Amino acid sequence: MVTLTGTQGGPSAFKGLAGPGTLVRYGGDAHDCSTLKLQFDTGRGTVMRLSDLGISPEQLNAVFFTHMHNDHTEGFADLVTLRWMFFASAARIDTVCSSDVVSTLGSSISCQKFTAHVADAFLQSGEVAQRHSEIKERSLGGPADLINTLTFTAKDEPQTVWASGDVKVSAIRSTHIAGHVSYRVDSPAGSVVIGGDAGNDVPAPPRPASTSEQVARLAQGADVIVHSAIHPVMGPDRGSAFPAYAYFRQSNVTDLGALARRAGAKYLMLTHLIPPLGAEKHGPFKVPGSPLAEADYRRAVEESGFTGNTIVGTDLATVRLPAIK
Ligand SMILES: [Zn+2]
């Protein structure tokens, strides 16, 4: 079962949409298909959307990050602090991400440091020590003590990065910012690809497509593809003033339809929509013409010839595959 826990595209906020995240649940019907709960990215408000589903943070088995952009990670402090506050004796949560890299512009990107320091502000303010003095199980090291960070070197071929029972998660390097990866969950009920914000390795046209060739490989035969999507209306030729580099490092909606068609996917779940449905502006950038409706995204997918189910993502949109194939 695949649920979008947040569909806002990028760091801006619009009408209460949560920041990007996808919850993948797996298990028998007796457990409402939810014995295992895997969270991919934790944007703003992830804990709130999980609470809409009746899921509290200590119930997650693992968190996976596609990349370190703040819109995909800023809900993590909230999530782990809540675990530390009320479930201090719970197992440390596996947190899976790619190992440290230096970007072409020279900045170091470190998921390892992010998780180690995610709640440092609460250490500095005295909050951690104060809460510890009330209940000793809350460790003095703070929420980071409850994180088990598992890093891997991103490669151009899929590699298994996490597994539990029948469920395997693999990852592949993809381009957006340095360290970006895309994931695939394989289970007896089916396969789900989480593309994240991946775009083509070639940063701008001319190129065959805006989508990632690695994601295309990862997605072969998958049932569900969840992917961030940008609508061509935000393109540099359309007057939105949305920066060209930022436009070209996302996958556009029509190219995603083509990727889903070639992969033979049953479902394409568009998320992280740029621009959001009904928005006159995307952050500071004007949406040319009138605000986009669901049908505008759907039409852009149809141009690709994809005939499976397209879900134009809103928070909590869910696809449920039969428990046993
Ligand atoms: Zn993003």
Image (cartoon, grey):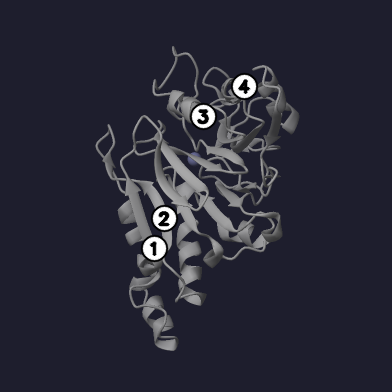
Q: Residue at left 68%, top 25%?
A: 289
Q: Kindly check if marks 2 and 1 are in contact, taking CB atoms under 8 A apart as contact.
A: yes
Identified by mark 3, the residue type is Phe
Note whether 255 is above or below 104 in the view shown: above
Q: Which label was assigned to residue 242?
A: 3
Would residue 118 be seen by someone viewing this image from the given angle? no
Identified by mark 2, the residue type is Thr
Identified by mark 1, the residue type is Ile
The alpha-carbon separation of the residues under discs 1 and 4 comes to: 38 Å
The alpha-carbon separation of the residues under discs 1 and 3 comes to: 37 Å
Q: Whole-percent x and y of residue 60?
A: 53, 60
Disc 4: which residue: 261
Front residue of this view, candidates 82 and 263: 263
Identified by mark 4, the residue type is Arg
For disc 3, does the CB lie below 8 Å from ligand 1?
no
Q: Which label was assigned to residue 58?
A: none
Which callout, 1 or 4, points at the residue further toward the start of the chain? 1
Disc 2: which residue: 95
Number of labels in the image equals 4
The alpha-carbon separation of the residues under discs 3 and 2 comes to: 33 Å
Disc 1: which residue: 147
Looking at the image, is mark 4 or mark 3 nearer the viewer? 4
